[in-house]
Image (cartoon, rainbow, N blue to C red):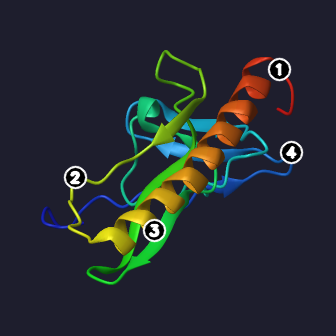
């Protein structure tokens, strides 16, 4: 292999028992048991460090269209966990963009409606997180 080619991680191995084996940089092969909400395939472009392995649920964005900016999205929000990071808690991950969108009254009202809907979704994710932390729905 030439020095200028990146190291490419091997694809994850699906095991007969439902687990997935991921090859890491620092800990060799790790066998993962994904929670039922995890949608991550655990295929990595480069072998990850063990602490960088994560579980995530389906991301959801607040989507809207404004007269001034056209289609706009805010988010996403999802459940996320880094099981080998030393903190095994599951979190609600809310990602925000730093971009601003100047809008008029109609656009502002559409943002408000989208945020109210998005807030309801974040509340539902918090309810699911409470259930997960209580040991339900694993």
Residue at screen point 38% across, 39% down: 25
**Chain-order first, disc 1 or disc 4:** 4
For the question of whether residue 44 can be seen, the reply is no
The residue pinned by badge 3 equals 110
Q: Which residue is mark 1?
A: 135
Q: Are marks 2 and 1 in contact (CB under 8 Å)?
A: no
Local packing at callout 2 (Cα closer than 10 Å; few below 14, some 14-19, many 20+) is few
Which residue is drawn at the image coordinates 42% and 79% (left, top)? 65
Is the residue 13 above or below the residue 35 in the image? Answer: below
C-alpha distance separating marks 4 and 2: 43 Å
Q: Counting residues from the N terminus, which is met first, the one under dot 4 or under dot 2? A: 4
Image coordinates of residue 69 in percent, x first then y, are 27, 79
Q: Nearer the viewer, residue 53 or 120?
A: 120
Name the quadrant of the C terminus.
Answer: top right
Which numbered mark, 4 or 3, is in the foreground of this view?
A: 3
* N-term-proximal mark, 3 vs 2: 2
Q: Return the residue at label 2.
A: 98
- In front: label 4 or label 2: 2
User: Residue at horizontal 20%, vertical 60%?
Assistant: 100
Q: Point out which mark residue 17 bears.
A: 4
């Amino acid at each position: 292999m030439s020095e200028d080619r990146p190291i490419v991680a091997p694809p994850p191995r699906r095991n007969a028992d439902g687990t997935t084996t991921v090859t890491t940089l620092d800990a060799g092969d790790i066998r993962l048991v994904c929670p039922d909400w995890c949608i991550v395939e655990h295929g990595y472009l480069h072998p990850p460090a063990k602490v960088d392995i994560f579980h995530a649920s389906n991301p959801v964005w607040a989507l809207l269209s404004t007269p001034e900016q056209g289609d706009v999205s805010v988010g996403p929000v999802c459940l996320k966990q880094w099981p080998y990071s030393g903190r095994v808690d599951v979190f609600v991950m809310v990602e925000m963009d730093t971009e601003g969108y100047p809008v008029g009254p109609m656009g502002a009202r559409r943002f408000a409606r989208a945020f109210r809907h998005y807030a309801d979704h974040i509340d539902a994710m918090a309810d699911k997180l409470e259930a997960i932390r209580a040991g339900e729905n694993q």
